[in-house]
Amino acid sequence: MPSIFREPDIALAYEYQPGAAPVVVFCPGYASDMGGTKAMALLEWCKRRGQAMLRFDYAGHGKSGGDFLDGTVGSWTADAAYIIRQIVPTQKIVLVGSSMGGWISLLLGRALPHHLAGLVLIAPAADFTEELIGPTLSDENWKELRAAGVVYQPSEYGAPMPLTFKLMQEGTEHLLLGGSIGIQCPVHILHGMRDDSVPWEHSLRISDRLQSEAVRMSFVKDGDHRLSRPQDLAMLCAAVAALVGEASG
């Protein structure tokens, strides 16, 4: 698998499939990677269509180097931006962000306005350090975070999930929901209404903050956080197809 070095000792893994523009760029969620169900479903869709696609792993994720515990929203956004600028520096892109990848996609969208043709956000966890996790932490959790630098939170998806004090602190530098989000391109937000990780109402707040008037929202009444069932994946591919078609037309 190819990789590029953003720092001397950290190799960032990526896979690029050449094809028609715009390039579909997938931004994974927290502790997820480019081999996840949604990323692979999109890859198969892109292959069938002959669409260009770029997938990658942030530092400390998947097949990239680095330590997960060293990462922050800012550093992972920088990883994504670096890969995009190195691999598809001039092409138009449609960003697809899942959970934390939705926050990162919004940050990338502001940083790369001339490249951005569209955004598809799946249960976007914008500002999750401040809005979703911080309020759930007890005084004891915060004490442990400050003393040890990390706590491990229970996860319904497997092993306990690490949460670092560095991540929580640095996240405050990238908050979006306190003001207008300067993105003008078409946006489609997908969210399950049985999401126990990111409440579906969170997407309404994001929609309200986006400057773009071309915002579509699809709520799935029986959908969970992952939205990885066959019908969810079909909806995701249809949402990407619509934005790719608008950008191509």
Image (spheres, rainbow, N blue to C red):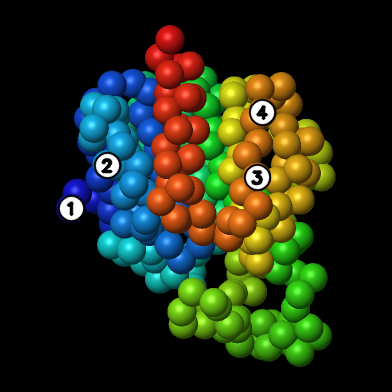
Q: Would you identify the image quadrant in which residue 106 lies?
A: top right
Q: Relative to the observer, which residue lies in front, 63 or 42?
A: 42
Would you name the residue on which mark 3 appears? 219
Compared across the picture, whether 103 is left or right of 40 comes to right
Please provide percent x and percent y for residue 72: 55, 61
Contact? badges 3 and 4 (CB < 8 Å): no
**What is the crowding at mark 2: few (fewer than 14 residues within 10 Å), some, or many (at least 20)?**
few
Secondary structure at numbered mark 3: strand
Secondary structure at numbered mark 1: loop
Would you name the residue on which mark 2 appears? 44
Contact? badges 2 and 4 (CB < 8 Å): no
Mark 2–mark 4 Cα distance, whole angstroms, equals 26 Å
Of callouts 3 and 2, the N-terminal one: 2
Would you name the residue on which mark 4 appears? 215
Of callouts 3 and 1, the N-terminal one: 1
Foreground tag (1 vs 4): 4
Compared across the picture, whether 55 is left or right of 112 comes to left
Secondary structure at numbered mark 2: helix
Q: What amino acid is labelled 1 in the image? A: Met
Quarter of the image where the C terminus is located: top left
Q: Would you identify the image quadrant in which residue 198 lies?
A: bottom right
